[in-house]
Image (spheres, rainbow, N blue to C red):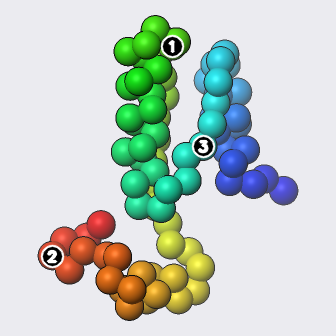
Amino acid sequence: YTTFSSIAGLVAKAFQAEGPSFMVSSSCTSGATALHAAAGMIKSGLLDIVIVGGVEAPLAEGLLEQYQRTGILSTQQPA
């Protein structure tokens, strides 16, 4: 059993990385938020190298329809 939050640690282990590993969950902006955090860590000198990734997968049944009903999805282009 693997939770979503442990994926960051598994990726770090696969790359034999040292230092902090964490997951950002902020809906559609997770990738951009993670990139922003990583850039700040590099700029501050806390880290020299970072690995950043992002994915949004609305897998729960009816979730995409719920997003559409609430108006949080773009009507002009895919989010």
Residue 4 at x, y percent in the picture: 68, 53
Which amino acid lies under the numbered mark 2 shown in the image of this protein?
Answer: Gln
Question: Mark 2 Cα within 10 Å, few/some/many (few <14, many 20+)?
Answer: few
Q: CA distance from mark 2 to mark 1?
A: 38 Å
Q: Can you say whether 45 is above or below 2 in the image? A: above
Which amino acid lies under the numbered mark 3 shown in the image of this protein?
Answer: Met
First reached walking from the N terminus: tag 2 or tag 1: 1
Query: Is residue 14 shown to the viewer in this render?
Result: no
Q: CA distance from mark 2 to mark 3?
A: 29 Å
Asked which secondary structure carries label 3, the reply is: loop
Q: Can you say whether 41 is above or below 61 in the image? A: above
Question: Mark 3 Cα within 10 Å, few/some/many (few <14, many 20+)?
Answer: some
> Which mark is drawn over residue 76?
2
Residue 39 at x, y percent in the picture: 38, 25
In the displayed structure image, the side of residue 3 where residue 27 appears, left or right: left
Q: Quadrant of the C terminus?
A: bottom left
Q: Which residue is mark 1?
A: 47
First reached walking from the N terminus: tag 2 or tag 3: 3
Which residue in the rendered view is the most extreme toward the left? 76
In the displayed structure image, the side of residue 54 where residue 2 appears, left or right: right
Which amino acid lies under the numbered mark 1 shown in the image of this protein?
Answer: Leu
Q: Quadrant of the N terminus?
A: bottom right
Q: Nearer the viewer, residue 16 or 68?
A: 68
Residue 29 at x, y percent in the picture: 40, 54
Asked if the residues shown at circle 2 and circle 3 are in contact, with their CB atoms under 8 angstroms apart, the answer is: no
Which residue in the rendered view is the most extreme toward the front? 44
Asked which secondary structure carries label 2, the reply is: loop
Q: Which residue is mark 3?
A: 23
